[in-house]
């Protein structure tokens, strides 16, 4: 085999490899962006409606187990990161059926609605009702993920655990006020 044929084959293999890498990056980037933008939208909207400096919030009696204020953005950032990665895994694998999509959307909407009910409307009753629904749909989402993608399921567990704790906080605030 001549040196030119060998060089030609190498160039062809390199070009083929570059095309495959580009296609892989494109096919992986779309579900990644979609997952992180959707979860990021929920996080941003929730943050917009959160106001812990309001006179109403500062007048509330908080339970003794209420964590320091810095805890919330740290935990929510981790939880949302895990949920975004889980959503990415589901989208990328192609096993995100209509039910799975609905459960993710319902969880996102309920998260934002809870923030509005609690911080903007200042309704402890409504926030507890929304939170109960949120917990139910979070468990349903985790159950669906368990059957669909185990890693996405494990990534959803901190979300469910944090929601359970946050519900205890919300309910305690409701009882104290």
Image: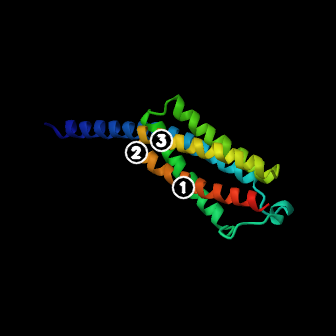
Residue 100 sits above or below residue 53 on the image: above
Mark 1 or mark 2: which comes first in sequence? 2
Q: Residue furthest top?
A: 98
Which is nearer the eye, 58 or 44? 58
**Residue 163 higher or lower than 101, as above or below:** below
Residues at circles 3 and 1 in contact by the CB criterion of under 8 Å? no
Cα separation, mark 3 vs mark 1, equals: 14 Å
The quarter of the picture where the N terminus appears is: top left
Q: Nearer the viewer, mark 1 or mark 2?
A: 1
- Check disc 1 and report the residue beneath it: 161
x, y (%) of residue 177? 80, 60
Q: Which residue is mark 2?
A: 150
> In the displayed structure, would residue 137 be above or below residue 58?
above
Mark 3 or 1, nearer chain start: 3
In-image side of 55 versus 50 (left or right): right
* Residue corresponding to mark 3: 143
Instruction: Give the Cα distance between marks 2 and 3.
Output: 10 Å
């Amino acid at each position: 085999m001549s040196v030119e044929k060998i060089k030609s084959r190498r160039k062809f293999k390199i070009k083929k490899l570059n095309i495959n890498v580009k296609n892989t990056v494109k096919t992986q980037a779309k579900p990644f962006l979609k997952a992180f933008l959707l979860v990021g939208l929920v996080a941003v909207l929730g943050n917009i409606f959160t106001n812990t400096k309001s006179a109403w919030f500062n007048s509330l009696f908080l339970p003794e187990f209420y964590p320091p204020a810095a805890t919330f953005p740290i935990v929510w950032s981790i939880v949302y990161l895990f949920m975004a990665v889980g959503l990415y895994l589901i989208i990328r694998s192609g096993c995100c059926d209509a039910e799975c999509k609905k459960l993710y959307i319902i969880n996102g909407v309920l998260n934002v609605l809870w923030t509005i009910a609690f911080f903007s409307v200042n309704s402890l009753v409504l926030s507890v009702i929304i939170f109960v629904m949120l917990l139910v749909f979070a468990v349903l989402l985790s159950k669906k993920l368990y059957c669909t993608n185990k890693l996405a399921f494990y990534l959803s567990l901190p979300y469910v655990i944090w929601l359970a704790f946050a519900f205890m906080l919300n309910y305690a605030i409701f009882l104290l006020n």
